[in-house]
Image (spheres, helix red, strand yellow):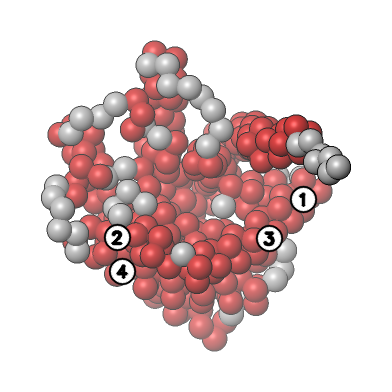
Amino acid sequence: MATGILSVGMHLERFDILSAGLVGVCCSGFVVLVALTGWRLVAYRSAVIEDFTDPRRGFGFFTFVAGTNVLGVRLGLAGLHEATAVLLVLAGVAWLALGYVVPWTAVLGRQERPVLATANGTWFIWVVASQSVAVAAATIEPVFDPVRRELAVLAIMSWSVGVFLYGAAGILVSLRLMLYEFGPEDLTPPYWVSMGALAITVLAGARIVEMADAPMVAATRDLIAGLAVVFWAFATWLIPVLVAAGWWRHVRRRVPLRYEATLWSIIFPLGMYAVAGIYLGRADHLPVVETVGSAGLWVAFAACVLVFVAMVVHLFRTVVAPGCLESSTTKPVVRG
């Protein structure tokens, strides 16, 4: 998701070589993650079921939908619209299935109460998944003329669902923060998805505004265009709040800042905010918004490089170095 959206941004800004490198990483990562997920489903089915039934982790499965559509959108920008369509079908089916399974198994079906105490930033990934369907549908809508109206309906429906889901997730997570004990160790990087969900809502809205005329588009274009600007403003307002929260966690409360996989959940929102600003600025003729998005793209890229370096160092220290140390301390057995 992170490298995919950065590749989209670099393509929009015409940094083609950098964009190509990022999409290569995105494609490789997608294949590896799908393979590992399939292997985990077969070899560790009980662990997968446990994740599905845990409201702290269950909504993370929606990253498959979002990541698939982000890759599809990038391939669509390269002219591979058929690949975008195939990935949209795959992600759309997963979105519908997970949209009914995860809330039931992870939230409504749990015997333990209160479930609200487990709400966290990952709940916003459901919103991201919904809006990713809207972005992918809007991307290929001008190309597949025979199903243009159906794609318009899908884009606007998933965008609308995502808006309402954001409101619900925002209320539930806010109640969790106010009603239950909340320490710095609970303020994990996935809370940045609250901003990323708004950013992809803006991007989806900007793409819908650019779509060719269809009955559903004509009826909602002005509304979506106005709301996209409102959501962009709120996403912008959230960034200093999230930065301040990180300062409070790591500086004031001294939680060690070390590499963890969830740090990538910061990169995707930053990249999505940048791409959303670029798209919105161009679609609605808002040069200030476009300029902010262009600057934000390099902030997201710099953050991506830092997290990648931290990941490499972490892997070296935890995987490579212990193995080398163990082999160097092993003494040969002398048989007499």
Between tags 2 and 4, which lies in front?
2
Write the residue at 54% across / 86% down.
146
Q: Earlier in the sequence, mark 2 or mark 4?
A: 2
Which mark, residue 21? 1
Q: Residue furthest bottom?
A: 146
- Label 4 or label 3, whichever comes before in sequence order: 3
Dot 4, crowdedness within 10 Å: few (<14), some or many (≥20)? some
Sequence-first disc among 4 and 1: 1
Residue drawn where x is 46% and y is 64% of the image = 44
Measured Cα–Cα span from mark 4 to mark 1? 36 Å
Q: Secondary structure at mark 4?
A: helix
Residue underneath mark 2: 53
Determine which of the numbered discs, if any, sits on residue 27 in the image.
3
Residue 301 visible to an observer of this rendering: no
Q: Kindly report the distance in space between the C-alpha atoms of the residues bearing marks 2 and 4.
A: 10 Å
Structural distance between the alpha carbons of marks 4 and 3: 27 Å
Gap in angstroms between the C-alphas marked 1 and 2: 37 Å
Q: Estimate the x, y position of residue 93 in percent, counting from the top left.
A: 44, 75
Tell me where residue 80 appears, x and y as whole percent: 70, 71
Q: Is residue 13 visible?
A: yes
Q: Position of residue 62 (x, y in %)?
A: 42, 60
Give the residue type at disc 1.
Answer: Gly
Q: Are marks 2 and 3 in contact (CB under 8 Å)?
A: no
Task: Kindly identify which residue carries mark 4.
Answer: 101
Q: Is residue 87 above or below residue 179?
A: below
| Residue at 25%, 29% in the rendered image | 182
Mark 2 closeness class: few <14, some 14–19, many ≥20 residues within 10 Å? many
Badge 1, how many Cα within 10 Å: few under 14, some, many 20+?
few
The label on residue 314 is none
Closer to the eye: label 1 or 2 = 2
Does 245 sit left or right of 324 as displayed? left
Looking at the rendered structure, the secondary structure element under dot 2 is loop
